[in-house]
Amino acid sequence: MASGVDRSLTVHEDQEQMLRHLAHELRQPLSGIESIAYYLDMVLAAESPQIQLQCERLRRMVQHAHWLIEDAALALRLQGTELAPVCLQDHLIRIGTEMALHEERNLEICLAEPLTRALMPAELTHAFCQHLLAFFRGVAQARDPIRVNIENEAGFVRLDIQAEVEAELDDLLRAIDPPPPGSGVRRIVTYCSGQLQAMAEGQMLALSVHFPSVE
């Protein structure tokens, strides 16, 4: 007879498989819509600036849909993961280097050394950092850098990410930190007994995340 733990794991695995299947099925039409938006932009943008704006808006909506799928997948992967001390800055520097090489996106990273390690789900740390930066990459103005700051603060490792954005700030705040049950991002932060705050001022979107510090 299966125990309660076994049944719980089976249900979780079924949910994860179903989400993966759903994500796969959704990505194909979303990618098609994005391709159509690029095509219309190239063909019709010269005739009407309004068409160009609407095509850009459509592309951002598709990118956001992709991000929401990944956010749900990240939340499902959290169950049963163990917390461990990690060097958060190592992951961010590696991702920033990849962005500079492959996407020509400038990521400005400021480290207030010496830094302690952060208590996080080690196997999800890199995916978590990629996920956060993917959100800002999708909404930031192309000509401006994404700014990242890491420092120690009163028993926590504090991670700040900010960028000037082109979309509506209220919509972005609801996307990155929606009401309960909340985002996958907040669930991971809460799982670590951390803190999360999303803020907006002018055209600047900022996210502040605190993870427990490990000496």
Image (cartoon, rainbow, N blue to C red):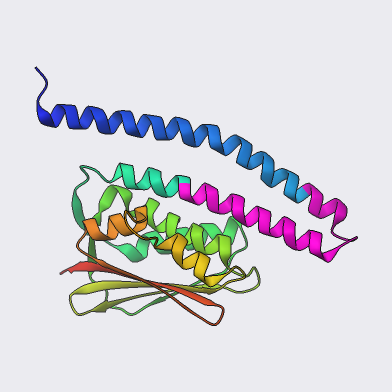
The answer to whether residue 69 is magenta is: no
- The one nearer the camera, 9 or 155, is 9
Q: Residue at x 29, y 55 (%)?
A: 187
- The one nearer the camera, 142 or 171, is 171
Residue 189's image quarter?
A: bottom left
Q: Position of residue 1 (x, y in %)?
A: 9, 17
Q: Residue at x 54, y 32 (%)?
A: 25
Q: Position of residue 54 (x, y in %)?
A: 73, 59
Residue ranking furthest to the bottom: 202
Left or right, residue 80 beside residue 185: left
The answer to whether residue 51 is magenta is: yes
Q: Is residue 142 above or below residue 29?
A: below
Left or right, residue 181 beside residue 192: right
Instruction: Name the dominant secondary structure of the magenta segment.
Output: helix
Left or right, residue 108 beside residue 208: right
Q: Residue at x 22, y 73 (%)?
A: 156
Q: Is residue 72 above or below residue 91?
A: above
The magenta region covers 39-68
